[in-house]
């Protein structure tokens, strides 16, 4: 099958998903996505194997059976995200606000009230789109970055979808993206960024659950350049709700080169997530290589 045909099929699948899931009764939609999750898990494909490898770092003493159970819950949690992502644009403002709960939200509130802006650095957990929609409603707007997807039409659908929720979306890798983020922060805006996956492969190496892992430098660098507070946030799910926890601010070190400050701050982000991810690790949706050992193995097999 040609790339063009594959891209067209992918675009059509996403379009149909968004359209169809909005009209399906909610319980039916959740059951459908759970069945998809169970079939995906049983096939034990590359993403499920990698998820179990990632979970083994979080739970080094877990048995094979325990990791399998965690990975099943993890795939179901990931499919719950997709189910809600397709349906979220149909939710009322009241539902978006009432079904997301952020512990220690006063830290963000204080930063936004002060006019300093804030950098909200989330893990790939729970429902980050729901968190973004909640943030846009609570603070009036926000600016974030989205990874470019292929085909381009799918990326455009994601941008349109997130814009419909009140978010300003900047494409990852564009030359102006970092400059615009700096401007928004200096104007007192909210900038949520995912910080636990180094998509660019140009990140900084930190210790994460006892092994070296690469994480993006953008959140720390933005904090250094703008003075906006950097807050790690752990996202999870609850029964019928999406949840989050705001951790203590990651302070900019007083000494050291810019590179060393970025490394120390990013290590602080990793430590914050280490303290909360294990409790509900199945809500952490990282099904790609994250640790250097896995990245090196992937490169060797490429």
Image (tube, helix red, strand yellow):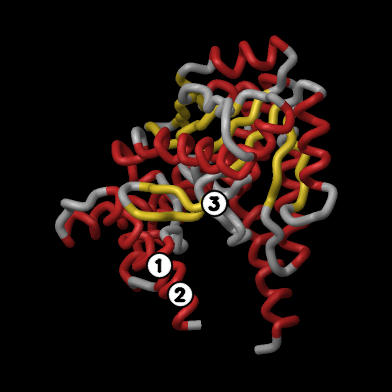
Check the image and report above or below for 83 versus 152.
above
Q: Position of residue 217 (x, y in %)?
A: 61, 46
Disc with the residue nearer the chain's start (3 vs 2): 3
Q: Is residue 63 left or right of residue 201?
A: left
Residue underneath mark 3: 204
- Residue under label 2: 298
Drawn side of residue 242 relative to residue 90, left or right:
left
Circles 3, 2 touching at the beta carbon (< 8 Å): no
x 31%, y 54%: residue: 55
Disc 1, SS: helix
Residue at position x 51%, y 32% in the image:
232
Task: Please tell me which residue is depicted at 39% across the width and 48% down the height of the picture.
Answer: 207
Displayed quadrant of residue 34 = bottom left
Q: Residues within 10 Å of mark 1 (few under 14, many from 20)?
A: some
Looking at the image, which is closer to me, 95 or 27?
Answer: 95
Circles 2, 1 touching at the beta carbon (< 8 Å): yes
**Which of the numbered marks, if any, corresponds to residue 90?**
none
Measured from the top left, where is residue 151 in percent x and y?
A: 73, 69
Residue 273 image offset from top left, x and y in percent: 41, 37
State the image coordinates of residue 60 (x, y, percent, origin top left): 21, 52
Which is nearer the eye, 96 or 60?
A: 60
| Image point (45%, 81%), residue name | 300
Tell me the CA gap for discs 1 and 3: 16 Å
Q: Is residue 237 visible?
A: no
Looking at the image, the residue that sits furthest to the front is 256
| Label 3 secondary element | strand
Q: Is residue 49 left or right of residue 11?
A: left
Label at residue 294: 1
Dot 1 and dot 3 residues touching (CB under 8 Å): no
**What's the CA distance linking mark 3 and mark 2?**
19 Å
The quarter of the picture where residue 112 lies is: top right
């Amino acid at each position: 099958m040609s790339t063009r045909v594959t891209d067209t099929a992918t675009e059509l699948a996403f379009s149909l998903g968004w359209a169809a899931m909005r009209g399906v009764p909610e319980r039916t939609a959740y059951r459908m996505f759970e069945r998809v999750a169970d079939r995906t898990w049983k096939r034990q494909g590359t993403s499920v194997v990698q998820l179990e490898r990632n979970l083994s770092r979080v739970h080094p003493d877990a048995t094979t059976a325990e990791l399998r159970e965690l990975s099943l819950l993890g795939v179901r949690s990931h499919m719950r995200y997709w189910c809600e992502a397709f349906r979220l644009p149909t939710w009322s403002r009241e539902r978006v606000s009432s079904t997301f709960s952020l512990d220690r939200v006063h830290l963000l509130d204080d930063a936004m009230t002060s006019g300093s802006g804030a950098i909200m650095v989330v893990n790939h957990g729970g429902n980050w789109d729901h968190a973004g929609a909640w943030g846009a409603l609570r603070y009036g707007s926000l600016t974030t970055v989205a990874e470019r997807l292929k085909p381009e039409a799918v990326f455009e659908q994601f941008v349109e979808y997130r814009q419909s929720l009140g978010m300003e979306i900047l494409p990852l890798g564009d030359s102006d993206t970092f400059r615009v983020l700096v401007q928004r922060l200096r104007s007192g805006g909210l900038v949520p960024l995912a910080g636990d996956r180094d998509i660019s492969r140009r990140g900084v190496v930190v210790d994460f659950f006892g092994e070296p892992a690469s994480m993006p430098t953008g959140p720390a660098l933005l904090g250094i350049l703008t003075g906006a507070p950097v807050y790690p946030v752990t996202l999870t799910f609850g029964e019928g709700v999406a949840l989050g926890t705001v951790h203590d601010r990651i302070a900019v070190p007083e000494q050291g080169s810019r590179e060393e400050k970025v490394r120390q701050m990013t290590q602080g982000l990793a430590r914050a997530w280490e303290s909360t991810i294990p409790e509900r690790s199945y809500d952490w949706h990282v099904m790609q290589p994250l640790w250097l050992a896995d990245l090196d193995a992937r490169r060797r097999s490429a």
